[in-house]
Image (tube, rainbow, N blue to C red):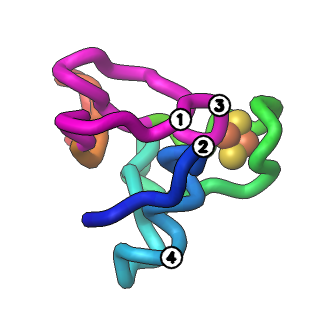
Amino acid sequence: MLAFPGETVAALLLRSVPSDAYRRADPLLEARAPLCLMGVCFDCLVTIDGQDNQQACLIAVHPGMRIERQLPSRGAV
Ligand code: FES
């Protein structure tokens, strides 16, 4: 995927990935996607370069970045 200079991970995902669910939230695996785009709702959490719970709306894309859908915690069904 190509990103614009200064573009956030959330903006890149919203315009590039056809999905209504960027992660599934415990305990019912509800679909979640970026909502506020200003660091308040925490609905944009993704895994970036192996680190969970990264707020995609607050992090600028950089070359070589590995962005993954965040998996539910181990306790989820
Ligand atoms: S979209 Fe709300 S915290 Fe990121």
Determine which of the numbered discs, if any, sits on residue 60 in the image: 1
Determine which of the numbered discs, if any, sits on residue 27 in the image: none
Q: Are marks 2 and 4 in contact (CB under 8 Å)?
A: no
Q: What residue type is labelled 4?
A: Arg
Q: Is mark 2 within 8 Å of ligand 1?
A: no
Residue 57 is one of the magenta-drawn residues: yes
Q: In which quarter of the image is the C terminus?
A: top left
Q: Nearer the viewer, mark 2 or mark 1?
A: 2
Where's residue 20, x and y in %?
A: 47, 76
Q: Earlier in the sequence, mark 2 or mark 1?
A: 2
Residue where numbered disc 4 is placed: 15
Q: What residue type is labelled 3?
A: Leu
Callout count: 4
Q: Which of marks 4 and 3 is nearer the N terminus?
A: 4
From the viewer's perspective, tell me whether residue 21 is left or right of residue 51: right
Q: What span is colored magenta in the figure? A: 46-67
Q: Quadrant of the N terminus?
A: bottom left
From the viewer's perspective, tell me whether residue 12 is left or right of residue 73: right
Q: Does the residue labelled 3 lie within 8 Å of ligand 1?
A: yes
